[in-house]
Amino acid sequence: MRPAPPPVVVVGRFPPPLDGQALATARLADLLASPLGGAADVGRVDVGAPEGEALVTSGGGVARAAHFLRLPARLRRALAAWPGAPVLWPSVSPSPLGHARDLLTVAPAFGRRPVVAVVHRGDVERLFRSPLTAATGRALVRRLAGVVFLTEGLAARCAPFVPAAKRWVVPNTIDDAAIPAPPEVEAARADRAGRPGVRLLYLSGMIPSKGYADVLDALAVLRGRGVDASATFAGRWPSSAAESAFRARVDALGVGGAVRVLGGVSDRTEVRRLYLDADAFVLPTAYPVEAQPLTVIEALAAGTPVVVTRHAGLPEMVDEGRGGRFVRAGAPAEIADAVQALGRGGTWAAASTAARARFERQFSPAVVGARWRALLARLP
């Protein structure tokens, strides 16, 4: 008779909203429950605030305040269904107010069970450097069984504060719906090779520091050079004013016929299709809390070469000159140069092959699942 699968509880923000952290949390729970992740008995406890907005960043509100006041008791009741099971905690915050929220409303409910924090933000080291949180941040690390970082670089930055025995690295992966099968990737390569023009894709939050304006300006540069280029922008707008300003810029550049603006795309099959249809995925991000963008992993899975900045965990995700190119933030001409360097024909096909190979080697569910199985086996 086969033994019962080991229990584990994932405590974090689950969709909705469909942002990067919520998606990564849901994917972690799904992976651990799958055979690739050990077929664990996975508990899912959502600690997200109403409408997906944290109390500390939303300016308050009666509903959100009530949510966090009730959270400790609700979390204890939920965890009681998995007595003694280890907790994976992918919503730990490095901000002073978020850290206070964690200490007052989340951490006390864990009791004495093993807890592993999973860091999804690239600015976590400020938890240990800020005079407001340095002491309590180190105390929290002493309480934790371990801290999982998404890249070696992010782990190294926290090495002075997190002992080596508690410092682990496990990258993100993506959901099955966003992973094209090899025949789909091959078919997309053949289609790209036989069509004219260059199709760019920006898929992320429409946040200025993510670089969407640079992508638009790069499109104008390419077209000014005589390249038959077009661009698709997919992502949620923070405000109608931001969207209006973007559309006005499109008109001012005279590239309206070459631009598609989709807004947020929640259908994961549609997301996969967007990557397969693009010649290059472009994310010239300087986002302050960037860590390891899921969108880059999605592009690599589709065999779509990427153009990104040397920011956060991105240098560990991309093979320079093979599956992608690096540019500086705020440099549209460099984006245009990188897109043209990817070329067409055999050069582009080699980049596409390298992109998919990087996904299989580093970010596939099989590889990431094996790392999680090894990590969980070390917990008491």
Image: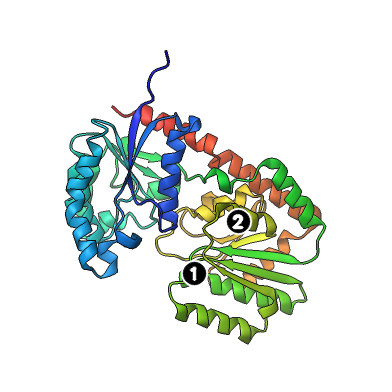
Is disc 1 placed on a helix, strand or loop? loop
- Asked whether disc 1 touches disc 2, contact meaning CB atoms under 8 Å apart, the reply is no
Give the x, y percent position of residue 154. Answer: 41, 50
- Choose the circle earlier in sequence order: 1 or 2: 1
Quarter of the image with the N terminus is top left
| For residue 293, above or below residue 215 | above
Q: Which mark is residue 206?
A: 1
The residue depicted at 17 percent of the width and 46 percent of the height is: 73
On the rendered structure, is 318 left or right of 339? left
The residue depicted at 29 percent of the width and 56 percent of the height is: 94
User: Closer to the camera: disc 1 or disc 2?
Assistant: 2
Give the x, y percent position of residue 274. Answer: 63, 58
Q: Which mark is residue 270?
A: 2
In-front residue for pair 60/289 = 60
Q: Amino acid at mark 2?
A: Glu
Q: Amino acid at mark 1?
A: Met
Give the x, y percent position of residue 223. Answer: 72, 76
On the rendered structure, is 324 left or right of 62? right
